[in-house]
Amino acid sequence: AQSVTQLGSHVSVSEGALVLLRCNYSSSVPPYLFWYVQYPNQGLQLLLKYTTGATLVKGINGFEAEFKKSETSFHLTKPSAHMSDAAEYFCAVSEREYGNKLVFGAGTILRVKS
Amino acid sequence: SAVISQKPSRDICQRGTSLTIQCQVDSQVTMMFWYRQQPGQSLTLIATANQGSEATYESGFVIDKFPISRPNLTFSTLTVSNMSPEDSSIYLCSVGSGGAYNEQFFGPGTRLTVL
């Protein structure tokens, strides 16, 4: 069965600092991995995804994530935080064998301090 | 990506009543999904709604409580029946992009408060 663990329900960084949001997954087969962002009172927006091929994937707003099979991780990073990055971030996994249904992590709220 | 709208955007309801949430997509899609996001929680899949077939419910969710309609390839409704305060959540619909990876795109959500 699939599962996703996001370490840290809240992360606080200073503006301009590195953003690192951690995600570990459990999957019996090579998974598809996603990061979504949810701004206050809004739906979810897809940031980036890993399906196959290159393990370092780039997304919108300067975010990127690296799929590390040996570590079962898919951490999200951004070199320099901006105030507009403050939001909640969800890591999700899906498997073709489960009809590509998404299983979400608990979410990480990112706070950016000026 | 598809443009998805939901109605209503928010509502306050009395316990024991029912609310129907609409989800409209600007293009034809095969797979639609309904999720619940309880306060301070992550998203939980309620059911998958494919056009032309009965919705498939996840463990813990039943049709009597959350009936779903999918009359065509651009529209779906979710009804929250006989509501209680525990049903206070954000309800989101999403659509699958199709293909091998089926990434999902989400609507803005419906914020429901049950008194």
Image (cartoon, coloured by chain):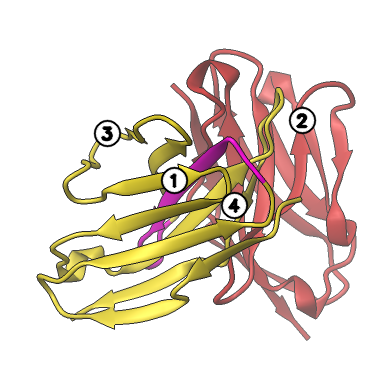
Chain colours: A red, B yellow
Residue at (88, 73) in percent of width and height = A16
Amino acid bearing label 4: Phe
Residue A67's tag is 2
Quarter of the rendering containing residue B30: top right
Quarter the C terminus of chain A occupies:
bottom right
Q: Relative to residue A95, is residue A33 drawn left or right?
A: right
Q: Which residue lies furthest to the left in this view?
A: B16
**Is residue A104 among the parts visible in the rendering?**
no
The residue indicated by pointer 4 is: A90
Mark 4 vs 1: CB contact within 8 A:
no
> Chain ID for label 3?
B
> Which residue bears the numbered disc 1?
B71
Label 3 or label 4, whichever lies nearer to me, is 3
Query: Mark 3 falls on what kind of element?
Result: loop
Q: What x and y, as percent, mark residue B71?
A: 44, 45
Q: Judge depth for marks 4 and 1 and give the one in front.
A: 1
Query: Along the line of sight, which residue is nearer the eye, A114 or A51?
Result: A51
Amino acid at pointer 1? Pro
Q: Amino acid type of disc 2? A: Phe
User: In the rendered structure, are the residues bearing label 2 and label 3 in contact, judged by CB atoms less than 8 Å apart?
Assistant: no
Residue A67, quarter of the rendered image: top right
Q: Position of residue B4 (x, y in %)?
A: 62, 60
Residue A52 within the magenta-colored segment of the rendering: no
* Residue in the picture at 60% in, 13% down: A29
Please tell me whether residue B35 belongs to the stretch shown in magenta.
yes
Q: In which quarter of the image is the N terminus of chain A?
A: top left
